Image (spheres, rainbow, N blue to C red):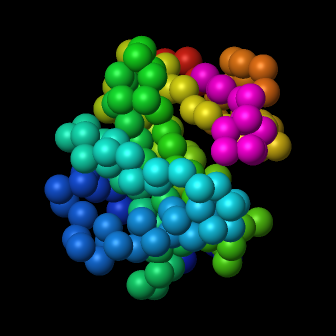
Amino acid sequence: MSSQTIDWQVLPFEKLTTAQLYQLLQLRVAVFVVEQTCYYQEIDGKDLVPQTHHVLGYKGEELVAYTRVLAPGVSYDNYASIGRVIVDKSCRGTNVGYDLMSRSVELAQLMWPNAAIKISAQEPLEKFYNQFGFVKASDMYLEDDIPHIAMIATAS
């Protein structure tokens, strides 16, 4: 699958339709709670922050890729952040994840050009995130029993 088959949208919370909100929450719960068996409060209030933007990738009517881009101070005091990075099983192993992160990093840099970006990355994906300028910034830690590392990309 090429990235041309994906319709990309970037929306703040108040511009999401009810259907889009349902789809993104459904995808986040399907991957993070069910597939990865992580039982945590998935709906954490950060979606409602006015500067939060949702990056949505649709294949037809189906949401297959998603991130949320967060302003400095929302997840980390002095850093913008990208979280809830998801590519649906049907699109893994394609360029969709690369396109998703490229768009998300570009959006964060556009919105907060003087802020570095910090993420909490699953440790096995370190090399993937290196492609976008992220470097390891912590020892491994467990988040919901999954090995993670903090990673930072410097401001553009």
Kindly report the secondary structure that dominates the magenta region of the rendered protein.
strand
Q: Position of residue 47 (x, y in %)?
A: 32, 48
Q: Residue at x 19, y 60 (%)?
A: 15
Q: Is residue 137 left or right of residue 85?
A: right
Residue 117 is covered by the magenta coloring: no
Q: Residue at x 20, y 40 (%)?
A: 50
Q: Residue at x 40, y 73 (%)?
A: 23
Q: Nearer the viewer, residue 129 or 145?
A: 145
Hey, which quadrant is residue 17 in on the image? bottom left
Identify the residue at the far left of this view: 14
Say whether residue 57 is visible: yes
Q: Position of residue 116 (x, y in %)?
A: 49, 20
Against 92, residue 11 (above or below) is above
Screen quadrant of the N terminus? bottom right
Residue 148 is covered by the magenta coloring: yes
Question: How many numbered circles does the render carry?
Answer: 0
Q: Position of residue 25 (x, y in %)?
A: 42, 66
Q: Position of residue 10 (x, y in %)?
A: 34, 55
Q: Nearer the viewer, residue 136 or 41?
A: 41
Q: Which residues are magenta?
A: 141-152
Q: Nearer the viewer, residue 98 or 2?
A: 98
Q: Is residue 31 left or right of residue 71?
A: right
Against 27, residue 123 (above or below) is above
Against 26, residue 150 (above or below) is above
Hey, which quadrant is residue 78 in on the image? top left
Say whether residue 131 is visible: no
Against 6, residue 51 (above or below) is above
Q: Residue at x 54, y 26 (%)?
A: 118
